[in-house]
Amino acid sequence: MNNEIFEAPWSRQLKWITALSSALLLGIPLVLLAKIPQAEMAWRSGMVLLPLAILAASAFFAIRGYLINGNALLICRPGWKTRISLQGLQEVAADPKAMSGSIRVFGNGGLFCFAGLYRNSRLGRYRAFATDQARAVVLKFPGRTLVVTPGDPQKFVAALENKKTDRETDR
């Protein structure tokens, strides 16, 4: 089966949030090293390492692209992939306003990506793997909704529609 790879370009918003958050997370340890007395080494170590750990963990979950591989969508990350089965895919559509008005229920709101559980009035609860909200593609399955943001939303939708059609003709 052919693998189709789609890039995950960053929006200006994601670039700014990541830059500012990274600067803050790198700056906190520098300030703390200068201000916390040497005698409180355990406290000092924890407060210095925590922001660096948050930055490193967030970078590990960054979204680098999307790969359609047979009956699965793979979310490409640095050194690993999240696999989403395409079994039961009912509907796929590009919708640049899909994430508008969303509230993050649990997840990352802009440090290297927008990922996790979100909710809004249009989609209800959904899972996002996004880097540029204006490129949103909504995938609807029975009982769950997924939003991804490939570089070419129309081409991505066409590729998934072809997979969906292929699965239906195989029945």
Image (tube, rainbow, N blue to C red):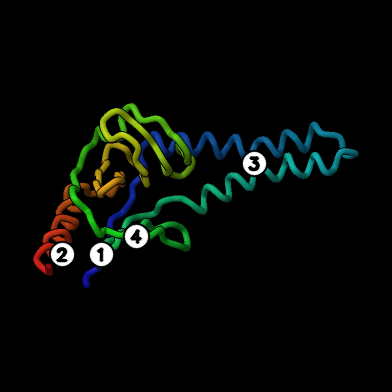
In this rendering, the label closer to the viewer, 3 or 1: 1
Mark 4: give few (<14), some (14-19) or many (20+) Cα within 10 Å. Answer: some
In this rendering, the label closer to the viewer, 4 or 2: 2
Q: Earlier in the sequence, mark 3 or mark 2?
A: 3
Mark 2: give few (<14), some (14-19) or many (20+) Cα within 10 Å. Answer: some
Alpha carbon distance from label 3 to label 2 = 46 Å
What element does badge 3 sit on? helix
Residue indicated by mark 1: 71
- Identify which residue is drawn at 43% across, 34% down: 104
Q: Earlier in the sequence, mark 3 or mark 4?
A: 3
Image quarter hosting the C terminus = bottom left
Q: Amino acid at mark 1?
A: Asn
Q: Amino acid at mark 4?
A: Leu
Instruction: Tell me, yes or no, whether the two marked residues, 3 and 4, touch with CB atoms within 8 Å.
Output: no
What element does badge 4 sit on? strand
Q: Amino acid at mark 3?
A: Pro
Residue indicated by mark 4: 74
Instruction: Tell me, yes or no, whether the two marked residues, 1 and 2, touch with CB atoms within 8 Å.
Output: yes
Alpha carbon distance from label 4 to label 1 = 10 Å
Quadrant housing residue 31: top right
Residue indicated by mark 2: 167
In the image, is 132 to the left or to the right of 27? left
Alpha carbon distance from label 1 to label 2 = 9 Å
Across and down, in percent, residue 69 comes to: 28, 66
Q: Earlier in the sequence, mark 3 or mark 1?
A: 3
Residue farthest to the right? 39
Residue indicated by mark 3: 51
